[in-house]
Image (cartoon, helix red, strand yellow):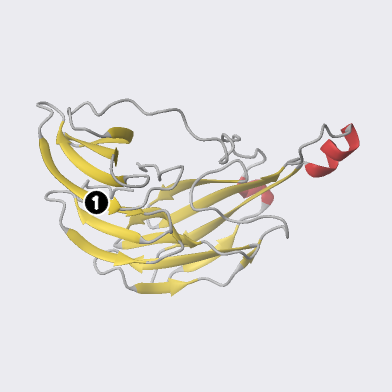
């Protein structure tokens, strides 16, 4: 997740611990966490979701300069079977819309049949559940949260993602020639931000690297997570 000026990024590891970086030189600005999902970076604030085992949605706003807590919302109840997840999965998907000093978080939660034997049509039907909604976070002083009506949230659920239990396809080799695999990449100004899986002991480490998009030269790199989960976090625009 990168701010509008392309100067700061906030990323999370597999436990939801946040790292803020200066994109000019890769310098560490602050760390915070765990159990937070970064959603938006604007107006000097980082808007995050707290990931917990309860069927609630809790927004936590941090100071973008220091990483300190600014504000925590009251819990918003989800269906009793729904849970927020650190990344988009088949069970929970999130879309973030940003406008001026407000962020709208649109969520979709799902369940499905997970048994081994072939189910009956009735079992299949009863196991399929879906719900969606949205909240608006206004970054005033202090911030505030409003639960949007069904009409404001939108009638359509977000597209279903691949099952999180299925490993993603093997990523291509890094274009910059280093002995790593590219998990994700995005262009920020004249630099390409590459999320890399670096071979090593165990499952390897996740590294964020800034590469000059014109020459392919490595500008800087930072290790984000020394222990890689099966599905590494994605870069966010």
Q: Position of residue 213 (x, y in %)?
A: 16, 29
Number of marks drawn: 1
Is residue 33 toward the left or the right of residue 215 in the image?
Answer: right
Is residue 94 toward the left or the right of residue 217 in the image?
Answer: right
Q: Choose between 149 and 26: the one closer to the eye.
A: 26
Q: Choose between 2 and 29: the one closer to the eye.
A: 29
Q: Position of residue 42 (x, y in %)?
A: 33, 56
- Spot the residue most to the front: 201
Q: Choose between 76 and 178: the one closer to the eye.
A: 178
Q: Position of residue 129 (x, y in %)?
A: 76, 45
Quadrant in which residue 160 is drawn: top right
Q: Residue at x 52, y 44 (%)?
A: 88
Residue 7 to residue 59: above or below: above
Is residue 124 toward the left or the right of residue 143 in the image?
Answer: right
* Quadrant that contains the C terminus: top left
Crowd class of label 1 (few under 14; some 14 to 19; many from 20; radius 10 Å): some
Q: Position of residue 179 (x, y in %)?
A: 21, 32
The residue identified by callout 1 is 223
The local secondary structure at tag 1 comes to: strand
Q: Residue at x 86, y 39 (%)?
A: 123
Quadrant in which residue 194 is drawn: top left
Is residue 99 toward the left or the right of residue 94 in the image?
Answer: left
Residue 84 to residue 124: above or below: below
Q: Choose between 192 and 63: the one closer to the eye.
A: 192
Q: Residue at x 56, y 41 (%)?
A: 164
């Amino acid at each position: 997740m990168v701010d509008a000026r392309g100067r700061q990024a906030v990323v999370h590891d597999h436990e939801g611990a946040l790292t803020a970086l200066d994109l000019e030189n890769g310098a560490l600005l602050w760390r915070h966490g765990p159990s937070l999902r970064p959603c938006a970076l604007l107006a000097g604030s980082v808007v995050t979701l707290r990931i917990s085992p309860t069927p609630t949605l809790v927004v936590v706003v941090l100071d973008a300069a220091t990483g300190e807590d600014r504000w925590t919302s009251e819990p918003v109840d989800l269906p009793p079977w729904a849970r927020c997840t650190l990344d988009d999965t088949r069970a929970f998907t999130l879309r973030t819309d940003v406008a001026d000093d407000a962020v709208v978080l649109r969520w979709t939660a799902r369940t499905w049949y997970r048994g081994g034997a072939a189910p009956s049509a009735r079992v299949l039907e009863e196991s399929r559940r879906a719900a969606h909604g949205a909240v608006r976070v206004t970054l005033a002083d202090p911030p505030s949260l409003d639960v949007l009506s069904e009409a404001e949230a939108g009638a359509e659920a977000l597209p279903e993602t691949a099952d999180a239990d299925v490993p993603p396809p093997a990523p291509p080799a890094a274009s910059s020639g280093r002995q790593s695999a590219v998990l994700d990449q995005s262009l920020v100004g004249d630099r390409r931000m590459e999320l890399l899986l670096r071979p090593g002991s165990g499952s390897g480490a996740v590294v964020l690297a800034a590469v000059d998009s014109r020459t392919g030269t490595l500008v800087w790199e930072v290790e984000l997570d020394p222990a890689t989960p099966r599905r590494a976090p994605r870069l966010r625009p």
